[in-house]
Image: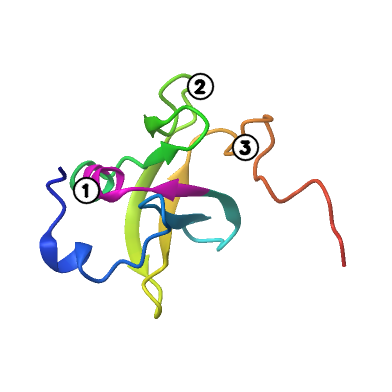
């Protein structure tokens, strides 16, 4: 059970696992930092605390970005895309966003 506003919850199109894709973008530069997943409770916590909270599919639990690394995300905006299946979080990233220690999860391989 989540405390997510029912009006917001009704607009979400979730995966079969009850998750919505979330893209984190650096405020000011537009740099895409990472992609993660949110369930209703993660979104509720993010909206109420302004600290990015995600659902870890591998751990099967909620996690606040930076809870172990200290590399936090302060959330300035949360936007829902036109289809309701992706969230955009506009954040101020402290430290690397990627679990590998790089600034973004998208700075390693350029395919085209």
> Which residue lies most toward the top here?
68
Where 7 sits versus 58, above or below?
A: below
Q: Which residue is mark 2?
A: 69
Q: Nearer the viewer, mark 2 or mark 1?
A: 1
Q: Earlier in the sequence, mark 2 or mark 3?
A: 2
Q: Which residue is pictured at 80% across the width and 46% down the height?
A: 108
Q: Which residue is mark 3?
A: 98
Q: Are marks 3 and 1 in contact (CB under 8 Å)?
A: no
The dot on residue 44 is 1
Q: Nearer the viewer, mark 3 or mark 1?
A: 1
SS at badge 1: helix
Picture quadrant where residue 84 is located: bottom left
Q: CA distance from mark 2 to mark 1?
A: 22 Å
Q: Which residue is pictured at 43% across the width and 58% down the height?
A: 15
Q: Could you say where residue 57 lies in the image, as x and y percent from the top left?
A: 48, 37
Q: Earlier in the sequence, mark 2 or mark 1?
A: 1
SS at badge 2: loop
User: In the figure, is residue 35 to the left or right of 63?
Assistant: right
Q: Count of labels shown? A: 3
């Amino acid at each position: 059970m989540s405390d997510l506003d029912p009006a917001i919850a009704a607009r979400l199109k979730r995966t079969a696992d009850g998750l919505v894709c979330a893209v984190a973008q650096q405020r000011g530069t537009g740099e895409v930092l990472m992609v993660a997943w949110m369930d209703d409770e993660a979104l509720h916590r993010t909206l109420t605390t302004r600290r990015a909270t995600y659902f870890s599919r591998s751990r099967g639990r909620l996690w606040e970005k930076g809870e172990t690394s200290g590399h936090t995300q302060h959330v300035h905006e949360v936007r829902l895309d036109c289809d309701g299946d992706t969230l955009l979080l506009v954040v101020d990233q402290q430290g690397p966003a990627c679990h590998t220690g790089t600034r973004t999860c998208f700075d390693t391989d350029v395919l085209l």
